[in-house]
Image (tube, rainbow, N blue to C red):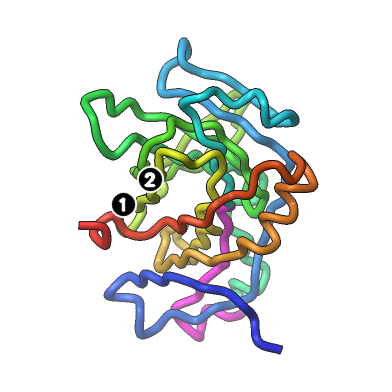
Amino acid sequence: MALEQRTFTLLSPILADTLLLRGLAWLVLPLFLLSGCASDNTRSDTWIDFSQIKDDEVMVLGKISIIPAVIAQDLKQETDTFRPFANERALLWVSTDVGSNKERLGLLADWDETFYFALPRQTMRLLELERAFDEDDELVYRALPLPEMMKFLVRVDDKALYIGNLRLYVDEYDQIVALEVVDESAAAQKAFQRRFGTAVRPRVSLMAPAAYFR
């Protein structure tokens, strides 16, 4: 049975010819958290009522997930149990694409769990990724470089937007060697309507490399 999925794939030029997918590791932790770039701009929300969204905001839903990637056959034995970023979360740094007020927002999400964030109703760029994990009862962050800046388009009449599943292929050195954006909008829209009702249907606007929009 064919899978009805649209994907955009971006491979590291050096590793593209040797990339070998080895299994799949998902970390599922229920959390929906929005944190700003400073303590006075930090808020935490679990969205239950769509009426909480402000008039100048859009509900953005999507997912970020990981698949282990092995680039050398002789590493097979060492990587059979490779589970990248176990017990960690993902911090997505985004900003508006136009205008003078390009404030960065940090979106803290769980791997392979649908997130729901209220963001300014403007086209947004995904600037950076970081890994977030607990260390000595404190949340610590570590950079996770993206191969390329990503972007998703927002229209002035959007109320809810689905931006795709950003699927990262991570090697044994904790580096992203490839990524793809997978369209799982059919399932995401059904989950959205179960959660928020049928009055609003999310429009699909998959993220893609920012260079594609020039």
Residue at the spot 75% in from the left edge and 31% down from the top edge: 48
Crowd around label 2: few <14 · some 14–19 · many ≥20 (10 Å): many
Left or right: 198 as drawn, with respect to 181: right
Q: Position of residue 28 (x, y in %)?
A: 72, 50
Q: Is residue 72 magenta?
A: yes
Give the number of the disc on residue 172: none
Q: Give the answer, above or below, for where 163 lies relative to 135.
A: below
Left or right: 17 as drawn, with respect to 54: left
Q: Give the answer, above or below, for where 186 lies relative to 1.
A: above
- The local secondary structure at tag 2 comes to strand
Quadrant in which residue 136 is drawn: top right
First to last magenta residue range: 63-76
Q: Position of residue 162 (x, y in %)?
A: 55, 52
Residue at the spot 54% in from the left edge and 39% down from the top edge: 159
Give the number of the disc on residue 126: 2
Q: Give the answer, above or below, for where 197 lies relative to 18.
A: above
Residue at the spot 74% in from the left edge and 48% down from the top edge: 193
Circle 1 sits on which residue? 149
Left or right: 118 as drawn, with respect to 12: right
Q: Position of residue 59 (x, y in %)?
A: 56, 37
Which residue is outermost to the top?
40
> Which part of the image, by quadrant, shows the C terminus?
bottom left
Which residue is outermost to the right?
194
Q: Is residue 193 magenta?
A: no
**Viewer-nearest residue: 58 or 74:** 58
Quadrant in which residue 50 is drawn: top right
Amino acid type of the residue that numbered disc 1 sits on in the rendered structure: Met
Marks 2/1 in contact by CB < 8 Å: the verdict is: yes
Give the number of callouts: 2
Crowd around label 1: few <14 · some 14–19 · many ≥20 (10 Å): some
- The local secondary structure at tag 1 comes to loop
Q: Position of residue 96 (x, y in %)?
A: 33, 35
